[in-house]
Image: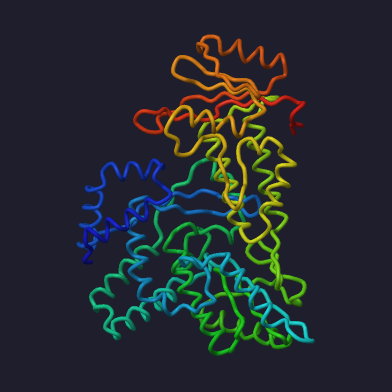
């Protein structure tokens, strides 16, 4: 297989996104040229084989899932393979296919469903929607059928002069290697959890020639390729105008309830005959006015609600964070804990990006009053108060913390000394670090809230980075959970 250095390097850069702090990524980057050369040689000599995958359990608080994480060097190959095939096939996907495609994610799918609701639910008659799901989708995929579909698309690209026959054979061979079973490494603590999962949620329980591992970039793309056959059937044979799919969860909308039921029977037959799949026994066939529970939202024609369990999951994480880093009225989170808190909140706010975020964040602040001293949601942005962004001097850092912690006694490290000022006090006082502990004890005895801002690396060559390290809150200011 002919692979250029530029292609491999681009794949390595894509693989690195969001993983730069990971141990495997850093080890790979430390020997980047050697690793790329080894991968290129293996691909060109047709000797490349996938390494053992790491198996663990991930849970979003509702459904634990078995995840298979490929070795980092294999992920680079995945980032090479998928774009090469995607550019040949992606244009064949229907507009209603919203999964694992850039800029077509959950928000796109929910927006499209709402538009379909508004188009159908007009006039005197109420519209209906039918929501279906495929039983154990990833572990039911027939690899022989998948490879046959892939070969058909590649041969079509050859016929259209967009690909050489030798290149099509190389892509097919590489995809076949990615699909083949490989050794799995499992941590002891994860094995106990895995043993409690039902058999249909375990990859090694799949019959021979069945199943794609959850957690691979290739699995995400090829699952779309597999269900593209269903998309084409629904759109072009059933002539369903209003249809949207996200992975194996899909919705059909029509004014006639009986028509939806007829389509359901046709879909059952198509999945069994062509793709060796079956639907889950539970289905949703309801009026549009009831709203659809779809991708974490309750979608209605003119507005959107977030699931209660999403907010509950967020609250559970905040409870866990608070119990770990709060002792009485003192919060002592490290830099990683603060970054984790911000990442959680940003993730949930991103998921709930189409609902009233300000109201939701205010609700959280009422349940977790300490949250407003670390993060602030303002004008659609999540502001991290614990560390000033892009400052050029000590005084700018000082003004940042004075602005957001006006009711606190501010203690800020400056080399072997610390500078402090009480609320409403304009002047700064300087004291050695050796008396800091006694000084904080006196503040606590007077029930005076205070924050300690410590040095933490460098903001740039001549300025120390400073972040909130300790925060003490009195009961008179806030009722702690």
Front residue of 210 and 467 = 467
Residue name at image x 57 percent, y 37 percent: 385
- Color scheme of the displayed model: rainbow
Position above or below: 164 against 69: below
Horizontal arrangement in the rendering, residue 83 relative to residue 281 (left or right): left
Q: Is residue 194 visible?
A: no
Residue name at image x 78 percent, y 86 percent: 125
Q: Where is residue 283 in the image (x, y as percent from the top left)?
A: 70, 73
Residue name at image x 35 percent, y 76 percent: 88
Q: Can residue 453 be seen in this view?
A: yes
Horizontal arrangement in the rendering, residue 131 relative to residue 109 (left or right): right
Position above or below: 118 against 406: below
Which corner quadrant of the image does residue 154 belong to? bottom left
Front residue of 51 and 288 = 288
Q: Residue furthest right?
A: 124
Front residue of 356 and 18 = 356
Q: Position of residue 164 (x, y in %)?
A: 24, 78
Question: Number of labelled discs?
Answer: 0
Horizontal arrangement in the rendering, residue 465 relative to residue 162 (left or right): right
Q: Where is residue 480 in the image (x, y as percent from the top left)?
A: 74, 31
Q: Which residue lies furthest to the front in this view?
A: 426
Q: Where is residue 295 in the image (x, y as percent from the top left)?
A: 63, 64
Position above or below: 17 against 432: below
Q: Where does the N terminus fall, quadrant-wise?
A: bottom left
Front residue of 214 and 103 = 103
Horizontal arrangement in the rendering, residue 177 relative to residue 311 (left or right): left
Q: Where does the C terminus fall, quadrant-wise?
A: top right
């Amino acid at each position: 297989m002919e692979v250029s250095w530029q292609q491999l390097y681009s794949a390595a850069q894509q693989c690195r996104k969001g993983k730069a702090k990971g141990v495997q990524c850093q080890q790979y980057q430390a020997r980047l040229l050697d690793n790329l050369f080894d991968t290129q040689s293996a691909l060109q000599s047709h000797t490349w084989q996938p390494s053992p995958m790491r198996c663990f359990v991930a849970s979003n608080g509702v459904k634990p899932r078995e995840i298979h994480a490929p070795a980092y060097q294999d992920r680079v190959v995945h980032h090479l393979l998928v774009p090469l095939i995607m550019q040949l096939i992606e244009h064949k996907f229907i507009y209603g296919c919203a999964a694992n495609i850039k800029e077509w994610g959950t928000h796109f799918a929910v927006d499209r469903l709402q538009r379909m609701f508004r188009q159908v639910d007009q006039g005197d008659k109420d519209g209906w929607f039918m929501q279906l799901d495929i039983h154990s989708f990833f572990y039911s995929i027939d690899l022989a059928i998948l490879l046959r579909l892939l070969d058909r698309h590649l041969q079509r690209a050859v016929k259209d002069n967009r690909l050489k026959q030798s290149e099509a054979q190389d892509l097919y061979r590489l995809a076949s290697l990615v699909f083949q079973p490989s050794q799995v490494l499992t941590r002891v603590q994860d094995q106990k959890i895995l043993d409690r999962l039902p058999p249909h949620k375990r990859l090694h329980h799949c019959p021979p020639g069945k199943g794609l591992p959850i957690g691979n970039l290739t699995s995400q793309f090829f699952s779309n390729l597999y269900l593209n056959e269903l998309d084409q059937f629904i759109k072009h044979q059933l002539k369903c105008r209003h249809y949207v799919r996200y992975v194996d969860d899909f919705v059909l909308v029509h004014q006639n309830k009986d028509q939806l039921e007829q389509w359901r029977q046709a879909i059952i037959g198509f999945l069994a005959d062509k793709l060796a799949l079956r639907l889950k026994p539970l289905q949703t066939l309801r009026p549009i006015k009831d709203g659809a529970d779809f991708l974490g939202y309750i979608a209605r024609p003119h507005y959107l609600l977030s699931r209660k369990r999403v907010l509950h999951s967020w609250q559970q994480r905040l409870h866990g964070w608070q119990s770990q880093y709060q002792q009485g009225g003192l919060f002592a989170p490290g830099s990683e804990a603060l970054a984790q808190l911000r990442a959680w909140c940003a993730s949930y706010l991103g998921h709930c990006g189409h609902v009233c975020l300000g109201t939701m964040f205010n609700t959280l602040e009422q349940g977790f009053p300490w949250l407003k001293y670390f993060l602030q949601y303002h004008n659609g942005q999540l502001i991290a108060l614990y560390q000033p962004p892009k400052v050029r001097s000590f005084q700018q850092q000082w003004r940042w913390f004075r602005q957001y912690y006006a009711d606190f006694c501010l203690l800020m490290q400056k080399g072997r000394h610390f500078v402090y000022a009480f609320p409403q006090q304009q002047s700064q006082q300087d004291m050695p670090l050796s008396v800091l502990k006694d000084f904080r004890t006196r503040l606590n005895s007077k029930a005076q809230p205070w924050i300690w801002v410590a040095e933490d690396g460098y903001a740039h060559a001549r300025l120390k980075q400073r972040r909130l390290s300790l925060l003490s809150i009195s009961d008179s200011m806030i009722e702690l959970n």
